[in-house]
Each structure stands twice: as C-alpha cells, then as structure tokens.
Amino acid sequence: LLLRRRVSHPIDEAVVAAVERLQPKYVVHFGGARLSEYQIEMWLPYFDKIGDPYLVLVRDEFLMRGTVACTSAPVVLAPGQSVLDKLLPESVRACFYSNHAQKNTALIRHGELLHIQLMHGDSDKAISRSALSLMYDRVFVAGQAGVDRYHRHGVDIPERKFRRIGRPQLHGIKVGPREKGPDEPPVLLYAPTWTGFTEDVNYSSLKEGATIVEAALARGVAVHFRTHPYTSTNAAYQARAEAIRAMLAADASRTGLPHRWGAAAESEMSLADCINAADAAVCDISGAASDWLYSGKPFAMTDPRGLRGGYLEEFPVAAGAYLLKPGAKNAEAVMAELFDTDSKAAQRAGTREYYLGDHAPEDLFEVFADAVRETYAQPVVKTADAVETAA
C-alpha cells in the first residue's frame, strides 16, 4: 500500500512575512544525521561576519538547537518541500551547502538560484571528491589539491566551477613552533577520525590508538586526545576511545602530565585551539590533517587499512607527514621524528601551499567573504556552458 502525503507541512505565515522583510541575499541549507551540527557550525560565524542578511534553513528538527547556538542569523525549520519553497523570497540569489545530505536536492531543484558546495573541512576522504558535487554551480575548495582530488578520481567538474578560497577557519592558527616554558612538557595532539558509514571509508586509527598513545607517554609527552563527533556511533570504537581516556587519566594521576581528553579537548577547545596548544600531531585521513598542516609543525598520519605503497598516491597530504605503519608498529620511530629530528620540515611547506593556498592568516576571511559576495552580487545567469552572475 502506497501512502502519499495529501496535506503539506503547516507553515507559520508570520515567519514567511518575517523572511520577506529580511530580504536575505542568500541562504545556508543544512540537513543531515544526528550529531552532524559541526558541519555547519564551522561556517556560520564567517557568514555572520560578512554582514549581509542571510537565512539558515534547517531541514531536521534535531539539528535546530545546535545550529541556533552558533549564529546570530535567523534560523528556520523547513522540514518539507512546501515550507522550503515559501522561504525563498526574490532577494535570494545563492544557496550554500556544507555536506551532501539527501535533502539538498529539494533546494537544488530551484535552478534559478546559484548553488555552492562548501563541504565541512578539506581532506582526502572519498566524500571530499564525491561525484555528487557535480550537481552544484560552484565548488569552494581550500587550494589546488581540492581541484586535483576530483579530477584524479574521474569527477570531471569544469574549472569554471571552482573557487580556491583557503579556509577561513585557519585564521586563528599560529604558524611555527609553539612557545613553551623551560619545564613544560612537549604536547602531542592525537585526533583520530570516525569509522564512516561503510568499511571502505573507515580511516579511523582507534584500533591502534592505544599503541600510539603508549609511545608518546613513554617519552614523557603530554597527550591531547580529541575524537571525532561521530565516534560514539560505533560501540566498538567508542569503547577504544574510552580505554584511551582511562589510560590518560591513569598516567596523569601517576606522572602529573597535563593530558587532555573528553570535554577538555573536544568541546571546551576548538580544533584551532588544540593545534595551537600542541607541538606535534597524529592524524588520520581527515580534515584535521589539512588544518594541522597550516601550522607548519610536524605531524604523522596513520595507515590502518594497510595501503602502504599506494598511500601517498591516494592521500597526497601525507607528503608532509610521517607515516605510521598498520598497527602503529613504528610508533617509537615516528615519535622520534616528531619531537627530535623532523626531517620533513622543508617538504611540509610545499604541501601546505598546495592544499591550503598561500593566503596570509589576516587575509583568510576576506578571501572567503569576497567569494561569497560574488555569488549574489548580480542576478544569476545560467547557460549550458557557463554559470556566472550577470555583469
């Protein structure tokens, strides 16, 4: 039996009137799974800073609270197509997205608008070069690596669609070695990613995380342990994370080292704060690796899936990193590189520019703001060969 909705979602006409009065120049669309608020939270403060009126359209009620908390812009719940369509006054010219949520297509169907994919961090994960990006009129990437990633995997997005904008989120990251007191211990940031929805995109190193942390503790290194927000979606990996937290708690009690874990590293500090507070890092294939790269400090990457020789070809960001073998069998040698020799210091500089551009920290916001303003500066004109704003 096929059941069809015969009554559209109810809508508050006062909200529609308020949106009309607002005259937003663009909208930011957000839908997704539970705990995915981080995907939009990283962008909203920068949209707020631009200063032009805009509207946030949230498609799932469980995402409302987290979204409202991180922006001063109006946020409207638009669960269905009928509501969504009424929240697009003629003043709107552009729509921004931070993921590939299925509900994005409900807005993309409005072909008269310009649709821009931001994604939620720069990484070499498969989702960051998904063919789904072909749906959008513009694709914002951090640097040339973001363009090449698509093309290397056969996703033929035309050059005209790309905008290389750096990452405004990096403006607060301090470049160069951390200043620390004479008696202050070195600090390692360990930032493993989550398992992904399927095993073929599971880049998490948590199975060998204890070995990595033990190697750092053996050197008297303070460890800041920051897990991905989705870690709790996999019970086995959540248990591994809890075991590492217990390990750090026990070591802190025994040695007095200022380890950080849980809320102290995951909610009370931003990723930029964590990067500034550490001397070296161990990352998986994730946006944390690219963001760390901006600091210029040494870092290692993990290979839990055992790609070995094909690792660098698949994940070029590793050109500036030290590679941990499957099972972290070479963890002691990698720690020596991170805290003693750092033989890849010069190579990291070229990798950094390739991934993140050559923008100075003080310019990062304006580069982003200019690219955003360009999307709604003029009426949208689309043809088969071009997507541009009218001159």
Image (cartoon, rainbow, N blue to C red):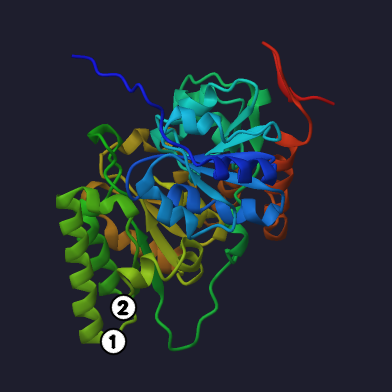
Q: Say what amino acid the circle numbered 2 marks.
A: Gly
| Image position, residue 266 (x, y; %) | 37, 65
Q: Which residue is mark 2?
A: 220
> Residue 161 lies in what quarter of the image?
top right
379 and 375: which is toward the camera: 379
Q: Is residue 389 above or below residue 211?
A: above
Position of the N terminus, as image quadrant, is top left
Q: Is residue 108 left or right of residue 49?
A: left
| Image position, residue 263 (x, y; %) | 33, 70
> Residue 113 lies in what quarter of the image?
top right
Q: Which residue is mark 1?
A: 256
67 and 251: which is toward the camera: 67
Q: Is residue 371 left or right of residue 198?
A: right
How many numbered marks, from 0 up?
A: 2
Residue 291 visible to an observer of this rendering: yes
Q: Is residue 211 above or below residue 350?
A: below
301 and 264: which is toward the camera: 264
In the image, farthest residue toward the right? 391
Can you tell which of label 2 and label 1 is closer to the viewer? 1
Query: Callout 2 environment at 10 Å: few (<14), some (14 to 19), or many (20+)?
Result: some
